[in-house]
Image: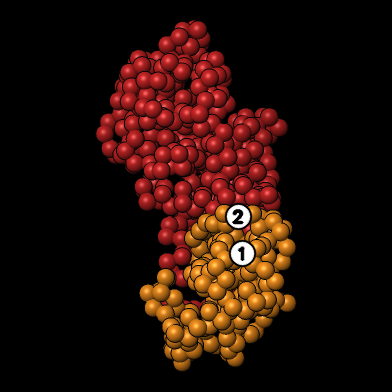
Amino acid sequence: MRVVEKTQLMSATEIDRTLQRVAHEIVERSGGTVHLALIGVRRRGVPLAQRIARAMRAIDGVDVPVGTLDITLYRDDLSMVAAQPVLQSSEISFSVDDKDLILVDDVLYTGRTIRAAMNGLFDLGRPRRVRLCVLIDRGHRELPIEAAFIGRTVQTSDMEIIEVRLNEIDQEERVMLVERVP
Amino acid sequence: MIQPETSAAAETRIAPEQIVPFRFNDLLAIEPLRADEITFLLDQSKPFQEIQRHPLKKLATLRGKTVGLAFFEPSTRTRISFSTAASRLGADTMQLQAESSSLQKGESLLDTVRTLDAMKPDCIVMRHRSSGAADFVARHLEIPVLNAGDGTHEHPTQALLDALTIRDRLGRLDGWNVSIIGDILHSRVARSNIHLLSRFGCRITLCGPPMWVPPELENLARCGEPLRRVSRVEEALDGADIVHVLRVQQERLHEPKLPLDEYVMLYQLTPDRLRLARPGALVLHPGPMIRGLEIDPAVADGPQSCVLEQVTNGLAVRMALLFLLIGHGGEDLPAKDAI
């Protein structure tokens, strides 16, 4: 199976502009930032959450705590994947009890990652509210999960894949639509 | 390379750098492991250390899996640690205990484990009084076997939890001066620790009554410097960064007769003796600890003692191993050689 790039969905500037907008929306629609905290889902949700927190600091001067969540142990497909994934640490240095949490991930697709992330979060405590923020919503949900903050909605087919590349992880910055060809 | 099989796998697909670099079919001993494999096992234990701090410690990761616990030798802490590790991962356990087992009725080891295996556990954790028992069983079963102590040979999970404790407290494993005090000859804990720490260039000193520290032990480690043997505990402690105190197995004291009070006088780790070690040196003990015999209560409860951290870390290490051995689909696992 080969993979070919079909089109570029977002450039570095567009990613930055989108994250600025999302940061504004979060501040605007949260009714105060006192209890707010961001949780980046490994891997690419982590730099996205950090960037949104930085943008929020520029808007409101507020320091929003950022945590990191590794969902490997909560996946529902571990017995289906042939390759065993490496575990990484979740780093959440604050109590999630009574917090207004925003889960941050790069792509929302079936919703299974977010289901796993929520199970992980609720093992840590009882947040007051959990909302979801994604850079790309590509549809095809298999669970009743929706994002409150969306960078961009993209219509995709089953054969397509969204590739998010971020400087912190991939040493390049763009979002691509790629297609699997037999 | 992107090859998602299902839509779910496509969403949560695993990048090549996120795939486990080593395959462990069993964990029978520390001796055959390389330093990078040991480091990997310790790294994979870290997420499970966090879980011990969660208000909710129960995962569903191994739901539907069964861990067979075959303890042919009495054990409390290791058995509880493994069964707690399994249940925190969501796995079920089937337990076979020495006292109630049909071994008492004359069944052979192989028949017993084959019977257990026929109940279809996903792995077997076993302890046995004979050295090499876990290895023997592993050669006859397809499922992973985890050695929880075999005779005087090895106790690999104990060495791993000790290493994790050392790494947490001192920041690294490499290059420390380690003194092991007690009955080295009969100690599988000592043997596994020697193999592990010598991989990381630690200088190891063995100390105890001469009949328990025979000259053959000097060449036990396959790499690094030969082990140093000393008979005076003061000499062993001088400059030590880590002190491993072994349990005095009282059942062995009669072998060549050694009065208990003499052992206490010559080898007990006391606050005065511990002052000979480096400031802040760690004190480890595999348990069960007998206060007033091999260790002075003031040392056991002191700030340098890691005893309770060792117990907590044991859970993390065992969860990591169970996850690594049975927590995947396994389609691409090579079948173990049938003998």
Would you name the residue on which mark 2 appears?
A: A94
Which secondary structure, mark 1?
A: strand
Q: Decide: marks 2, 1 in contact (CB < 8 A)? A: yes
In the rendered structure, the answer to whether residue B127 lies left or right of residue A4 reads right
Question: Residue B217 at what x, y percent from top left?
Answer: 34, 26
Q: Residue furthest front?
A: A61
Residue A74 at what x, y percent from top left? Answer: 63, 62
Against A67, residue A31 (above or below) is below
Residue B23 located left or right of residue B237:
right
Amino acid marked by disc 1: Ala
- Kindly identify which chain the residue marked by label 2 belongs to: A
Label 1: chain letter: A
Q: Considering depth in this image, is B196 or B137 the residue closer to the camera?
A: B196
Towards the viewer: B234 or A3: B234
Residue matched to label 1: A37
Query: Secondary structure under badge 2?
Result: loop
- Which residue is at 42% across, 60% downward? B21
Colour used to depict chain A in the structure image: orange
Query: Residue at the location (53% across, 87% down)?
Result: A160
Give above or below for B30 relative to B3. Answer: above
Residue situated in front as seen by the camera: A102 or B120: A102
The residue shown at (38%, 34%) is B194
Q: Mark 2 is on which residue type? A: Phe
Q: Quadrant of residue B289?
A: top right
Query: What is the distance, in whole Å, between disc 2 and disc 1 at their CAs?
Result: 9 Å
- Image height of B113 relative to B9, above or below: above
Answer yes or no: are tags 2 and 1 on the same subunit.
yes
Name which of mark 2 and mark 1 comes first in the sequence.
1
